[in-house]
Amino acid sequence: MKLFPNCKINIGLRIVRKREDGYHDLETIFYPVYGLHDELEVEPSDDFSFVQEGLTVDCLPTDNLIYKAYVRMRERYPQIGNVSIRFKKNIPFGAGLGGGSSDAAHMAIALNEIFALGLTKQQLAKEVRPLGADCPFFVYNSPCYAEGIGDELTPIDLDLSDIRLVLVKPECGVSTKDAYGGIVPKGYSEFKKVAQNRVELFRVASNDFEDTVFAIHPELASIKKRLLDAGAIYAAMSGSGSTIFGLFQSDTEGTTDANLRLLNEEFASMVIFNNTFSKA
């Protein structure tokens, strides 16, 4: 069974409050990016094997969320047997794109199918939640307003199929500790109210991590400014970074296409995606 775990972007990310358990409640819009994905092949086997290819992942195979998803699911469902896993990493890690969480969710989806567990999406979402707060999103894999620690999801009718997306991932990474270092919770915003009206959403949505992260990595602020100068109708950091994305509306004069070609040349080593949002 072959699956293609895709990434996501965050349209806005607001830190609402700090919880007693040390985590933070937030609100954000998760939007799937199907065109940029990893590759995951899972087959029943006499012996367990895990082969990893593509981008280097900065962890041991046993620390990979794919492996952790397999171990967790097998502990809970003894009918799951050995599998051979072949995994190709294409989504940069530490990029704010949720690649690892997507890999874990898709591994659980594969096991559910291969071993006929009969789990619903709601049940699968609960199974993968301990592996990462945004893992449940990738079970549903459609636009959602998220709150809590990112695991309380409300599906929304937000369509960006006519929009071109540019993802720029510089070499620098952003640690979660640094991202939260200067955060001051602000309470709820208008995100949920305007989530399905993209004009209003782009007007009110912002990423609370940007002030802190941009102070540490000013090059990220420069990339965002360049995307806006090139005509992006919205640009922001995704999650806690370090990917910066821009959303571009096509025009009849061809200005957008010309600007995007210039961006590709300017950020040749950093553009990891430049295309329209595709369907799953």
Image (cartoon, rainbow, N blue to C red):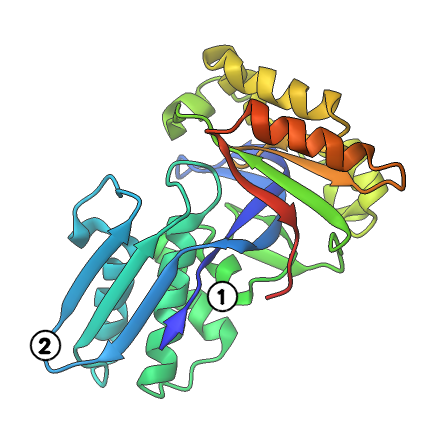
As drawn, is 188 to the left or to the right of 86?
right
Q: Quadrant of the N terminus?
A: bottom left
Please name whichever residue, 260 or 121, is drawn nearer the observer in this view of the structure: 260
Q: Which residue is mark 1?
A: 139
State the residue at coordinates (47%, 15%): 217
Indicate the position of residue 133 as horizontal and vertical percent values.
44, 50
Indicate the position of residue 119 as horizontal and vertical percent values.
43, 81
Q: Is residue 58 visible?
A: yes
State the residue at coordinates (66%, 26%): 262
State the residue at coordinates (13%, 72%): 48
Q: Secondary structure at mark 2?
A: loop
- Which quadrant of the structure image shows residue 232? top right
Q: Classify 72 as above or below 188.
A: below
Please name whichever residue, 220 or 178, is drawn nearer the observer in this view of the structure: 220
Select label 1 or label 2 by which is in front.
2
Q: Which residue is mark 2?
A: 47
Q: Classify 274 as above or below 41.
A: above
* C-beta proximity under 8 Å, tags 1 and 2: no
First in sequence, mark 1 or 2: give its number.
2
Q: Name the amino acid type tagged 2.
A: Asp
As drawn, is 153 to the left or to the right of 77?
right
Q: Residues within 10 Å of mark 2 (few under 14, many from 20)?
A: few
Q: Quadrant of the C terminus?
A: bottom right
Q: Name the amino acid type tagged 1.
A: Val
Q: Secondary structure at mark 1?
A: helix
Q: Residue furthest left?
A: 47
